Image (spheres, helix red, strand yellow):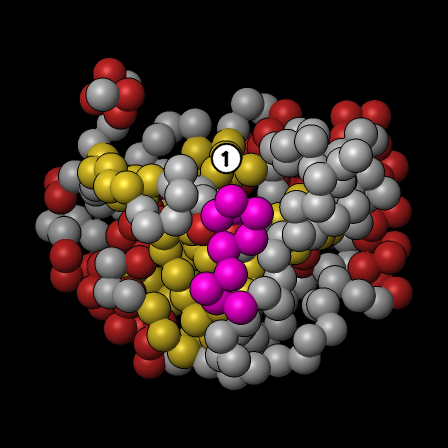
Amino acid sequence: GHFERRGVSARVNQESVVCTYRSNFLLPDASAPRVTCALMGDVATPALFDALNAYASSTETGSYEVLRYASDTPVERNKALEEASGQVILYVSSPIGSVSEDAIGMLAGCMERAEVAAVSPQVLRADGLIDYAGLCIQPSGKLMYMSRYLPTNDYAYVGRSQRPYDALLVNHALLMLRVDDACRAGGFDASFETSAYASACLCMTLHQAGMLAVYLASVRFSQAATGSLLASTVGVHAVQDRDLLARRFGILYGQGDPSHNPNFDPESAYYRLKW
């Protein structure tokens, strides 16, 4: 009923996780967007190309292009925005081992909502642990990856890791953006050393402009290899970027992430209640 009133084509089903629904936004065959897939580093895999080919063959107008870059930096991400011929761009910065054939279409379908400028799927590590299931910013400016390293079948507090939501931030490592919106927001700020924090800055700028970012838990990508359990945002550049992000947005987000329930501890990635 809600989607019908808004003129959005979607199919909604109840999930096995309590209080959770799966919304599949349906792409009109005649207006499926062209997808630019930006590979940030040596991350091409057959599974990713299978998903791109499945998307292109599933609709009348859906197509894709692949752009390759040597490394993942804010400068290279801006170059991809400039060179993209697609309406949406999918940044990939880690090799994908498995993904469903409808994954690209579901991400692009989510962007049929005019207010959505960014979307990220759930990402699992090759060892079965959660890599990405939501992202928040702590009051200090540090990025906090929700439910990271929990087992896949651990749904976190009342199914939070499996529940889609409109977020302030989404995952830079597997990120779909609407190209026009990202360009209007100024793209990735090269003042940041890391793409993680440059992407966070872009999401927050889009949020200020009234746009939404979405964590789409019903779409799941699995990594091809198991990486270190040390978070990718740890290091001297990440600390510098954290401080820069806090200075830039501290007045707005000094109390924590507005998309994070205030009843939870803003410093806990595992939904610890704030007593």
Question: Label 1 crowding class (10 Å Cα cut-off): few <14, some 14-19, many 20+?
Answer: some
Q: Is residue 197 left or right of residue 46?
A: right
Q: Visible in this render: residue 191?
A: no
User: Which residue is drawn at the image coordinates 45% and 44% (left, top)?
Assistant: 163
- Judging by the rendered image, the residue that carries numbered circle 1 is 166
Residue 260 % position (x, y): 64, 35
User: In the image, 86: left or right of 231?
Assistant: left
Residue 157 spot, x, y in % from top left:
57, 47
Q: Residue at x 48, y 48 (%)?
A: 159
Secondary structure under the numbered disc 1 in the rendered image: strand
Specify start and end residues of the magenta stretch as a single range.
Answer: 151-160
| Main SS of residues in magenta | loop
Q: Quadrant of residue 251?
A: top right
User: In the picture, which quadrant includes the C terminus?
Assistant: top right
Q: Nearer the viewer, residue 236 or 156?
A: 156
Up/down of 194 relative to 40, above or below:
above
- Residue 153 screen position, x and y as percent: 46, 64
Residue shown at the point (37%, 28%) measured from the top left: 114
- The quarter in which the N terminus is drawn is top left
Instruction: Name which residue type carries label 1.
Output: Asp
